[in-house]
Image (cartoon, rainbow, N blue to C red):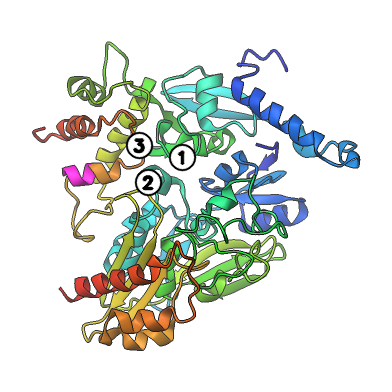
């Protein structure tokens, strides 16, 4: 790990200013992904701004009838919150399907949104990776791509967004709130938060340098049956090959987002009008234009079948 | 190297230093001229309460909580397996919660209350979870055991506190101590000897159900 200086400010404005004025500085919250990457020298910050003392760790009701989740609310606490369990079950389920108990106790809401891909070529510093080293190429394109993206990727990068929580937040239409060094605030729809790689896969979100996430807001509850179904190589503590976050209403209508298939949580609203017609009608539309590799084409069928299982579960 | 009484140079640093030197030889000539600030270690003071004792340390900012315990406080019960949060051998209970001590910095824990395996119990005063692991042969080589035991103690506290898991059938009901719950909640602790069945029996016994 490269050496770094460290500070622990006590207000969001101070934290944003500290990152803005220090070259090569990064925020650290739970640190479960950042420190892992620092050990591998994939991330090499010269300065860490610890945001754990900022107090952004509560879940409050909003005037619109939703919830405002502080950026530092731990994954365990968000999943266990009685209001989230009752009204946003898909979010609790997604969080509990991710990582391990130890990691969920540390990992934060904002940090989870910002976790980097687990593409093996991103992690292996001996391989070409446009995300890790822009312009170096993509070893994954002709490599072992079983885990990687089938849609939304580019010739520069076929990495997936690895998370579960963000898939549920996408189906719930959450909003990400930020503050910058000058005190300016922004509200970014989760749909616009993660970006597709194009020819700049190193830019993964709509955040600008120095932007600090302060909260994620959830709109008022959708009702319906909440399902998060995750298919992976072992029963627990593994990344999704395919996951489905679905909210299904009694009349068969609903919403669905897919994880493990794209560089961002994958939701195509136009496909949801076919929910009542069954899984294939939805996935045919949601995955139109997919460009799987020979190794990951199975994900298209798996997505259809996982959605079918989710719809069946919702009707039971 | 300073004579601080810490383990001055370990194998990992030798290996990392060796590969850094090899990498340097492949840089263009001009790149040797600058020493970046990143190359200079930064030391900071941090105070922790470890197993009930106040401890003051001055550490390189890079020091993980695990390395602080093992290499500076010489509490070598917590083990370094993968050092990437994948195996759980480093599990400690920090401010009442189990975490991977390898994936957090010691300087981030100013004032924290930390319990390691040494703080749960000693050979003549075993914690009930330690005694149950002995009784049920919840280990073979023993390397993952301190992390398994810290995790097991925390898992029972999490179930008692009403925290649901991936296998909890009804999110709005209290979860029970079942084999499925224990196996799911312990999935962050890997045992390469495969003592899992006995680990589940030990935790089940401590939870107060017949094993």
Report the Cα–Cα distance between label 1 and label 2: 9 Å
Mark 1 vs 2: CB contact within 8 A: yes
**Point 50% across, 34% down: residue:** B83
Of A137 and A185, nearer the camera is A137
Residue B189, numbered label: 3
Q: Is disc 1 surrounded by few (<14), some (14 to 19) or many (20+) residues within 10 Å?
A: many
The image quadrant of residue A185 is bottom right
Question: Can residue B50 be seen by looking at this rendering?
Answer: yes
Seen in the image, is A240 located left or right of residue A201? left
Residue A2, numbered label: none
**Point 36% across, 41% down: residue:** B188
Label the magenta part by its dominant secondary structure: helix
| Residue B181 within the segment the image draws in magenta | yes
The image quadrant of residue A12 is bottom right
Mark 3 vs 2: CB contact within 8 A: yes
Question: Can residue A66 be seen by looking at this rendering?
Answer: no
Looking at the image, tell me whether mark 1 or mark 3 is earlier in sequence order.
Answer: 1
Q: Is disc 2 surrounded by few (<14), some (14 to 19) or many (20+) residues within 10 Å?
A: many
Q: Using the image, determine if residue A134 lies above or below residue B35.
A: below
Report the Cα–Cα distance between label 3 and label 2: 9 Å
Percent position of residue B61, x then y: 65, 34
Name the residue carrying label 2. A100
Name the residue carrying label 1. B85
Seen in the image, is B155 located left or right of residue A32? left
Q: Which residues are magenta?
A: B178-182
């Amino acid at each position: 790990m490269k050496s770094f200086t460290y500070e622990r400010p006590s207000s969001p404005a101070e934290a944003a200013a500290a990152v803005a004025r220090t070259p090569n500085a990064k925020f650290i919250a739970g640190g479960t992904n950042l420190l892992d990457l620092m050990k591998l020298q994939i991330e090499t910050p010269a300065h860490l701004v610890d945001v754990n003392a900022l107090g952004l760790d509560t879940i409050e009701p909003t005037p619109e009838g939703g919830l405002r989740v502080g950026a530092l609310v731990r994954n365990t606490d968000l999943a266990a919150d009685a209001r989230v369990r009752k009204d946003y079950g898909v979010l609790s389920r997604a969080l509990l399907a991710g990582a391990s108990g130890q990691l969920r106790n540390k990992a934060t809401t904002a940090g989870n949104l910002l976790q980097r891909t687990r593409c093996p070529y991103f992690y292996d510093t001996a391989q070409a990776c446009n995300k890790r080293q822009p312009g170096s190429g993509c070893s994954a394109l002709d490599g072992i791509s079983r885990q990687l993206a089938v849609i939304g990727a580019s010739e520069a990068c076929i990495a997936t967004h690895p998370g579960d929580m963000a898939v549920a937040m996408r189906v719930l239409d959450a909003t990400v709130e930020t503050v910058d060094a000058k005190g300016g605030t922004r509200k970014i729809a989760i749909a616009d938060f993660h970006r597709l790689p194009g020819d700049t896969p190193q830019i993964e979100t709509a955040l600008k340098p120095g932007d600090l996430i302060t909260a994620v807001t959830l709109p008022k509850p959708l009702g319906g049956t909440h399902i998060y179904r995750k298919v992976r190589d072992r029963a627990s503590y593994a990344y999704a090959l395919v996951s489905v976050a679905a909210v299904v209403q009694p009349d068969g209508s609903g919403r669905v987002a897919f994880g493990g298939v794209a560089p961002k949580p994958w939701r195509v609203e136009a496909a949801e009008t076919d929910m009542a017609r069954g899984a294939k009608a939805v996935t045919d539309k949601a995955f139109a234009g997919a460009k799987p590799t020979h190794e990951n084409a199975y994900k298209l069928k798996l997505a259809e079948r996982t959605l079918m299982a989710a719809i069946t579960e919702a009707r039971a | 190297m300073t004579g601080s009484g810490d383990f001055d140079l370990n194998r990992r640093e030798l290996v990392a230093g060796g590969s850094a030197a090899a990498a340097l030889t492949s840089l263009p000539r001009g790149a040797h001229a600058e020493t970046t600030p990143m190359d200079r270690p930064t030391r900071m003071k941090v105070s922790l309460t470890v197993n009930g004792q106040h401890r003051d340390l001055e550490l390189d900012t890079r020091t993980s909580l695990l390395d602080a315990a093992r290499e500076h406080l010489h509490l070598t019960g917590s083990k370094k397996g993968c050092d990437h949060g994948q195996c759980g051998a480093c599990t400690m209970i920090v401010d009442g919660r189990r975490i991977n001590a390898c994936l957090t910095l010691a300087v981030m824990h100013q004032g924290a209350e930390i319990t390691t395996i040494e703080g749960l119990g000693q050979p003549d005063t075993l914690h009930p979870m330690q005694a149950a692991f002995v009784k049920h042969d919840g280990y073979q080589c023993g390397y993952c055991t301190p992390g398994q035991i810290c995790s097991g103690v925390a898992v029972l506290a999490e179930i008692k506190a009403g925290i649901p898991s991936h296998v909890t059938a009804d999110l709005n009901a209290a979860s029970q101590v079942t084999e499925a719950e224990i196996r799911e909640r312990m999935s962050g602790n890997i045992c390469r000897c495969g003592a899992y069945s006995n680990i589940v029996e030990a935790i089940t016994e401590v939870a107060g159900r017949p094993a």
